[in-house]
Each structure stands twice: as structure tokens, then as C-alpha cells.
Image (cartoon, grey):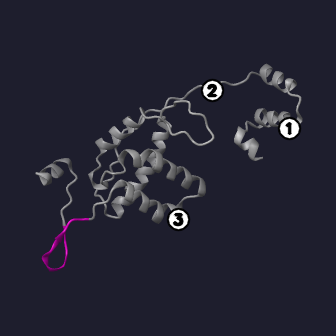
Amino acid sequence: MQIKLAKKNGTFVPPVKIAKGAVRAKQEITVSDFLDEYVEVYGLKKWGNSYYSMSTGLIRNYIKPYIGDRYVRSLTVRDMDSYYTMLLDKPAVVVSGHLDTGAKITAHTVGRIHKLLKSAFGKAVVWEYTAVNPTIGATLPTAKAEKREVWSDDEAVAALSACEEQPLRICLYLALGCSMRLGEILGL
């Protein structure tokens, strides 16, 4: 019955014949174990520090808790569609040093997760853990652009004239004149 169901779903992979007529199924591996191997074998060689940090954070916070115990071979495009939709209702992880605003996972974050998983499952196909990449053909949620509040010229001039401390005034000039963010200003 399992073989019939796998054939119907298009996920059936016949067992591999080994020496002396013994038959052994291809190795089953969970998404969690596979991603650990993927990061170790592929990520450490190919990713820069920033992308490595972001990717391991996505894996730790958004992938392993939800689909980490599933087998790589068992995932389908439908599973990925359901996973991406389910993520939108989950709370975003609060990074240390930030306030918990109760925000949900955004479509932008789901897009990053998809990009990471697409690359990972591409390697899973090459490494023969699965026959198909379940992320190819998956439907991503549409990201909604939010309009940002921007100071008017009068508000910027009023803020600069109200600022009496020289270091803070320099920071305001950098933020307004160079469009620098807080982290960039503090780093400088």
C-alpha cells in the first residue's frame, strides 16, 4: 500500500540492489540532520559570515521547530505550500536586545527561508537523499510593501536645531544626510 501511495504521489524511489542480491533502501534522513550536514559540508565553504549567521538562524528558529523531524524524502510541494502558509501565523523570533512587539513572521522572511531550502533540497537531490526538490513549484506568500514614515524638511530642521549635544548632532547629520541606520552610525 505504501508503494502504491508513493507511486501515486510521485515520490516512489525503488530500493538499490547491492552485492549478493541483498536489497537495501536508500538512506532516510530527517530535515534537521540533513540541514546540519548541508551547513557543515556546503555552507561553511560557500557562505560569508553574514549569510552563514542569517541561514543558521533561519534553520534554528523557523525550519527545525516545524519540519525538522520530517524525512527529506517524504516532503512534497504541497507540504511546502502548507508550511509557508503556516509560518505566516507564527510569532517572529525576538532577537536578544530587541523588544517583543508580538510581530508575526513576514512574507519576506518566508522568502528567505524558501531561498535557503531551495538550495538545500537541490543538494539533497544531488546527494541522492531525495528524487525531487519539493520547493520547486511551491507557492510563496506575497510580500506587502509597507509605507515608511519619513520626516519632512521642516521636521528635520527642527530636530537639528533642537539638538544641543555635538555627538548626537553628528549622528543626526549622518542619519539625515547619508540615510544611515542606527546600527551603521553606532558602528562608525
Residue that badge 1 annotates: 167
Q: Nearer the viewer, residue 131 or 160?
A: 160
Q: Residues within 10 Å of mark 2 (few under 14, many from 20)?
A: few
Q: How many marks?
A: 3
First to last magenta residue range: 16-26
Task: Please tell me which residue is depicted at 50% across the width and 53% down the height of the picture.
Answer: 56
User: Could you tell me which secondary element the residue under label 2 belongs to?
Assistant: loop
Task: Please tell me which residue is depicted at 50% across the width and 29% down the height of the picture.
Answer: 144
Task: From the viewer's perspective, tell me whether residue 97 is left or right of residue 2.
Answer: right
Residue 101 x %, y %: 56, 30
Amino acid at pointer 2: Arg
Task: Please tell me which residue is depicted at 80% across the width and 37% down the height of the picture.
Answer: 171
- Does 171 sit above or below residue 118? above
Residue that badge 2 annotates: 148
Residue 176 x %, y %: 77, 32
Indicate yes or no whether the magenta region holds residue 14: no
Residue that badge 3 annotates: 45
Indicate yes or no whether the magenta region holds residue 23: yes
Task: From the viewer's perspective, tell me whether residue 70 is left or right of residue 173.
Answer: left
Q: Are marks 1 and 2 in contact (CB under 8 Å)?
A: no
